[in-house]
Amino acid sequence: IAFDLLWHQKRKRGEPFDPDVRGDMESKGGKGATGDGWRWPQLPFEVENLFATGSPLAMFLTVRGDILADRWPLGSKDFAFPGGAKLLNIFHPTDPVAYRFEPLLDPKRAEA
């Protein structure tokens, strides 16, 4: 939920908060987020980092069909949400639930 909320933020870093602005109704994959006209709320504060610890986020993004490579240019060391927040994926290789995020964006990183 935190990933999707940050993905749909319209305000760029340093811009003032406008309570009348709402995010897109559709998800990244083009499917309706809820189908009832609900729009993603905008946060009245800036988020600098999202820490995903032991998260299966990459698996959920793969299952949903959300490929984010167009948002993270190949060779980039950082992934940033539209509002500027950074995603930090912390996992242990033997964790059965955690998935790596990097190979989803750049297949060359699958072997790292």
Image: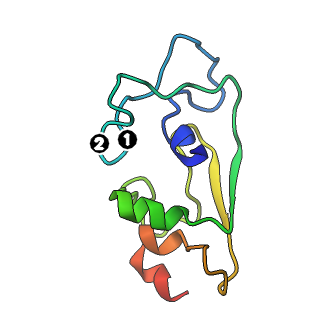
- Residue displayed at 50% across by 89% down: 111
Give the label on residue 100, or none: none
Q: Which quadrant of the view contains residue 43?
A: top right
Assign the N terminus to one quadrant of the image. top right
Residue 18's place in the image compared with 40, above or below, is above
Q: Secondary structure at mark 2?
A: loop
Residue 52's place in the image compared with 75, above or below, is above
Query: Which residue bears the numbered disc 1?
Result: 27
Q: Position of residue 16 (x, y in %)?
A: 64, 17
The reply to whether residue 5 is in sight is yes
Instruction: Categorize mark 2 by other alpha carbons within 10 Å: few (<14), some (14-19), many (20+).
Output: few
Q: Are marks 1 and 2 in contact (CB under 8 Å)?
A: yes
Q: Which quadrant of the view contains residue 34?
A: top left
Query: Which residue bears the numbered disc 2?
Result: 31
| Front in this rendered view, residue 112 or 15 | 112
Q: Position of residue 66 (x, y in %)?
A: 36, 56
Residue 30's place in the image compared with 50, above or below, is above
